[in-house]
């Protein structure tokens, strides 16, 4: 479940990042179509919220919130590292995380 | 319209003045803050570091009830006349029983408190090599090895500058959300360093703000005593009132046997559904004896400094007073300070603490280097005063960023290499830390052009040597600890190796950045006075921490100084 929280945080940040014109262009070499922006952002925020929820179910709200903030920082730094040096891998990892999170949560 | 225009100007003015504040508040205490951040990060692993530094001690933890019984037997035999006993039962992180007692009549010049570590299995005192272990970093982090109370004041003032720097930094940062994920090392120079600095700061912001503010809250009694002075006649009354579990209760001066403490511990643990973290006995062997049990600070986020407690009569075992829950004020203060200490953190969260704290170290390091990168781009070659200030700051940067890391490695190496029976051994370990740092500073000023590259390489080599020397001098090296699953020893060695790789890579980046401009002299003719240091410095900043590694590395490639 902690891993699920981490995956959700990473996937959420990836989506939010893709929902920004600059990063979308960097990754796909074309301008972001309008209709992509809102779904990406909505997905990103929902994933971050679910990540908090996942963390809180394991650890309780007070400990879980602290743990979640740690997860966010590490996931964000990791994503930025990927984006800079392995942009393709960053995208793949985001997708894998988005798919893995529900499985990890159930399991 | 006019009003709008005026407002816009005012805003720009605020940003600019905040930018000025951020630059200078950050710089003045930057080097101290770098050392504080790094040692503070290490202090999250305080017992684990001590464990590594006393490899001859191999003990398995035991349950609190049984350990308290062992401890009471030892103290009744060795310190029956002591005024107070403090017993810390073993935990997952610290397998030894820690005892502290106040000797009734210390010899002149000696301290009144005696510390003993017991093996819970056989009740024997355990002695390892003399070392301060993780306590060195813990203490340095807020006392800076300076006499009480000056070190604490210096650290607090540095902390206030940090808080000012963080808040002014947030105000200055124009595009905190737009640039949230932005890191463009290939742009080079100031831009790249700025991105790296922003990324490390913004992503770790909740932690950085929390740790800086809560650090000041930990010292609030020292920093803001007015309220206490107004209400209490003397500080003792205040501490007795707030830290009730530590209160000194008076003796009756009639001998009476002390009850068995272990059953009280069992009873309290059941009632709390938690662990007893400390047992305090006042006046053992006296009719006025009391036994105070305090809940383990690892049991909840807010128990770091203030935890629930119970006081029993030391002869009859009757419950005298206690607090099972804390008031709103105590919980609030407890949560803030508890978050700083991180004692509640399970291993995974402790690693998060460590890594994000290293990102904070990187934030300070990149900030220091950014100061240089910004000025170097605008520097006028004829301005000797400016050249001097650039050289001074760059030297301090290299000597501190690489030097403190080298010092930490030297501290660990000294622990393994100094003779085990050397008198004052622990002092020599600390001296190794400070000598390494001081030598790095000297080197940084003697060898202007190679300093970053060389010092980073030295730090990397020293870090890489730590596991090697450990393997040569003990039987608990990676070849043994990994198969055994001894993660404290193995984790320590592996972290040293990982940091060594990071620093070696930064050193290589620094070397490359230094060579590149030399090959194309035409590109940087104006820079003669500044030369290499600029580029090199950029890399160095990264060195501080693993977390920051990524940003820095990228930064150099483009060579920052091209005008």
Image: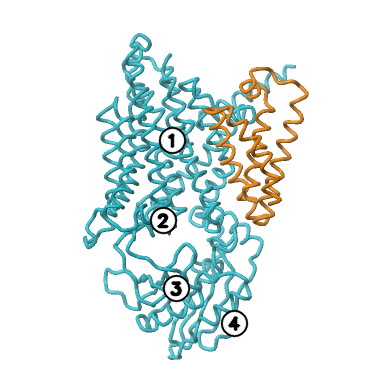
Is residue B97 something that shows in the picture? yes
Which colour is chain B painted? cyan
Q: Spatial distance from mark 2 to mark 1, Cα to Cα?
A: 37 Å
Q: Residue at x 35, y 26 (%)?
A: B389
| Count of numbered circles on the image | 4
The residue tagged 2 is: B483
Cα–Cα span, label 4 and label 3: 19 Å
Chain label for disc 3: B
Chain-order first, disc 2 or disc 1: 1
Mark 3: few, some, or many residues within 10 Å (few <14, many ≥20)? many
Whether A5 is drawn above or below B80: the answer is above
Which label lies toward us, 1 or 4?
1
Give the chain letter at badge 1.
Answer: B
The image shows residue B357 at horizontal and vertical percentages of 49, 44
Quadrant of residue B206 within the rendered picture? top right
Dot label at residue B365 = 1
């Amino acid at each position: 479940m902690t891993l699920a929280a981490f995956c959700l945080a990473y996937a959420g940040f990836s989506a939010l990042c893709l929902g920004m014109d600059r990063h979308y262009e960097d990754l796909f070499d074309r301008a972001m179509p309008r209709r992509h922006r809102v779904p990406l952002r909505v997905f990103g925020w929902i994933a971050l919220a679910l990540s908090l929820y996942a963390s809180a179910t394991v650890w309780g709200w007070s400990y879980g919130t602290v743990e979640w903030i740690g997860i966010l920082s590490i996931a964000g730094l990791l994503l930025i590292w990927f984006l800079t040096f392995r942009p393709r891998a960053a995208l793949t990892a985001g997708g894998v995380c988005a798919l893995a999170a529900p499985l990890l949560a159930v399991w | 319209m006019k009003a709008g225009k005026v407002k816009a100007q005012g805003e720009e003015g605020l940003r600019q003045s905040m930018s000025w504040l951020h630059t200078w508040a950050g710089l003045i205490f930057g080097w101290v803050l770098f050392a504080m951040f790094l040692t503070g990060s290490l202090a999250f692993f305080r017992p684990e570091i001590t464990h590594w530094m006393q490899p001859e001690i191999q003990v398995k933890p035991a349950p609190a009830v049984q350990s308290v019984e062992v401890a009471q037997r030892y103290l009744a035999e060795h310190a029956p006349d002591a005024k107070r006993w403090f017993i810390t039962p073993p935990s997952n992180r610290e397998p030894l029983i820690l005892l502290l007692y106040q000797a009734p009549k210390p010899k002149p010049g000696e301290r009144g408190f005696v510390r003993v570590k017991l093996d819970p299995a056989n009740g024997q005192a355990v002695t390892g090599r003399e070392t301060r272990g993780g306590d060195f970093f813990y203490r340095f982090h807020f006392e800076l090895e300076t006499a009480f109370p000056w070190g604490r004041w210096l650290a607090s003032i540095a902390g206030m500058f940090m808080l000012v720097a963080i808040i002014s930094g947030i105000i200055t940062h124009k595009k905190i959300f737009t640039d949230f994920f932005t890191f463009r090392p290939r742009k080079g120079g100031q831009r790249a360093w700025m991105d790296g600095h922003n990324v490390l700061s913004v992503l770790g912001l909740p932690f950085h703000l929390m740790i800086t503010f809560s650090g000041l809250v930990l010292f609030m009694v020292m920093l803001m005593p007015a309220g206490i002075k107004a209400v209490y006649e003397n500080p003792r009354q205040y501490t007795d009132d707030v830290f009730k579990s530590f209160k000194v209760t008076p003796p009756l001066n009639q001998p009476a046997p002390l009850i068995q403490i272990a059953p009280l511990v069992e009873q309290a643990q059941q009632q709390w559904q938690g662990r007893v973290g400390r047992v305090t006995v006042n006046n053992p062997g006296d009719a006025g004896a009391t036994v105070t049990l305090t809940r383990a600070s690892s049991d909840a986020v807010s128990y770091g400094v203030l935890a629930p407690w119970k006081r029993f009569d030391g002869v009859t075992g009757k419950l005298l007073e206690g607090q099972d829950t804390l008031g709103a004020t105590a919980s609030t203060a407890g949560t803030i300070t508890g978050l700083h200490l991180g004692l509640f953190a399970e291993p995974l969260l402790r690693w998060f603490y460590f890594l994000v704290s290293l990102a904070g170290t990187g934030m300070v390091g990149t900030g220091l280097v950014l100061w240089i990168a910004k000025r170097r781009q605008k520097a006028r070659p004829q301005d000797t005063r400016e050249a001097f200030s650039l050289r001074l700051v760059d030297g301090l940067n290299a000597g501190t960023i690489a030097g403190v890391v080298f010092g930490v490695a030297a501290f660990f190496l000294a622990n393994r290499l100094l003779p085990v029976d050397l008198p004052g051994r622990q002092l020599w370990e600390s001296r190794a830390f400070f000598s390494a740092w001081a030598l790095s500073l000297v080197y940084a000023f003697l060898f202007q052009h190679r300093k970053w590259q060389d010092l980073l390489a030295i730090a990397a080599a020293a870090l890489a040597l730590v596991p090697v020397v450990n393997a040569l001098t003990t039987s608990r090296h990676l070849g043994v600890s990994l198969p055994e699953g001894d993660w404290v020893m193995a984790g320590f060695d592996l972290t040293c190796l990982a940091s060594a790789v990071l620093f070696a890579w930064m050193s290589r980046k620094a070397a490359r950045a230094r060579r590149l401009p030399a090959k194309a002299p035409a590109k940087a003719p104006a820079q003669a006075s500044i030369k290499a240091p600029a580029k090199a410095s950029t890399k160095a900043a990264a060195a501080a921490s693993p977390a920051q590694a990524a940003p820095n590395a990228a930064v150099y490639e483009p060579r920052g100084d091209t005008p």
